[in-house]
Amino acid sequence: MAIIKSAWELALEKTEKLQVDPIKIKRDLKVKEGRQSAGSFLSDMDATKEAIKQQYDAVPAEEKEAFKEGMTLTMLSNLALPRNAAFKDAFTKVLDLGLILGEGNDQVVQLLGQLEGFFTQYLENQEDLVERMKQQFAPALQQKEAQLRKQYGPNFTLRPEQDPEFMKLLDKQLSQLDEQYTNILTQAKAQIKEMLGIA
């Protein structure tokens, strides 16, 4: 008959096999530090490019790769499809980080510059799509509005945003647009990682 082990004994057996790798722990901490530095720079409107550059340059050579990886990961996670034109203010800081991390690599700077145009184009395409959808849906909306005026009076107006059918169609179209742009953005992020030597 087999001996039934307690959960405590099983846990002890598993932890005995674990090895603590101090080098990996130190590296992970440096990556985390890089992420936090980049995050602070991006979120603090008063943080300057010069200050983050000094901080980056002050990292010892043997720790630079891990620190750079952390900063790069934070920078890339902040590259997302914009919701409005105000993205340009925050994007300037992302560009600054790219310049520092690129350390003179013109391709990184060029690609990040192209992304600014890409984001602007995305917002324009989104606007155009909404306008086109409103035009296409106008006859159906006028018909619904005429029916609702019989119910609610002659002053009743129906905006496209109030119509569930319109919003459903619009959401579907916007989702497709988002998907197309997200795929391109994902490829661009992968290229930036590669250019910066981040695995």
Image (spheres, rainbow, N blue to C red):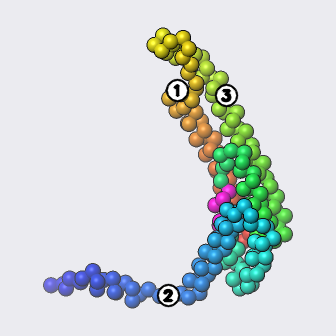
Q: Earlier in the sequence, mark 3 or mark 1?
A: 3
Q: Which residue is depicted at the point 68% across and 53% down? A: 185
- Residue 66 in the image: state x and y as whole percent: 66, 78
Residue at 37%, 84% (x, y): give it: 14
Give the prevailing secondary structure in the magenta stretch. Answer: helix
Q: Is residue 41 above or below residue 135?
A: below
Q: Which residues are magenta?
A: 73-79
Residue contact between numbered discs 2 and 3, judged by CB atoms under 8 Å: no
**Residue at 67% over, 28% down:** 132
Please give the residue where the numbered disc 1 appears in the rendered image.
Answer: 163
Mark nearer the viewer, 3 or 1: 1
Tell me the residue that label 3 is attached to. 132
Residue under the point 72% across and 45% down: 85
In the image, which is nearer the foreground, mark 2 or mark 1? 1
Q: Amino acid at mark 1?
A: Asp
Q: Mark 2 sits on what residue?
A: 20
Quarter where residue 44 is shown:
bottom right
Q: Nearer the viewer, residue 39 or 48?
A: 48
Q: Place residue 112 in its image quadrant.
A: bottom right
* Quadrant in the picture for the C terminus: bottom right
Residue 98 visible in image: no
Q: Secondary structure at mark 1?
A: loop
x, y percent for residue 42: 69, 63
Q: Are marks 2 and 1 in contact (CB under 8 Å)?
A: no
Judge the density around disc 2: few (<14), some (14-19), many (≥20) Cα neighbours within 10 Å.
few
Q: CA distance from mark 2 to mark 3?
A: 59 Å
Around disc 1, counting alpha carbons within 10 Å, would you say few (fewer than 14), some (14 to 19), or many (20 or more)? few
**Distance between the Cα atoms at labels 2 and 1?**
59 Å
Front residue (pair 162, 176): 162
Check disc 2 and give the amino acid type.
Answer: Val
Residue 134 in picture, x, y percent from top left: 63, 26
| Figure check: 129 above or below 145 | below
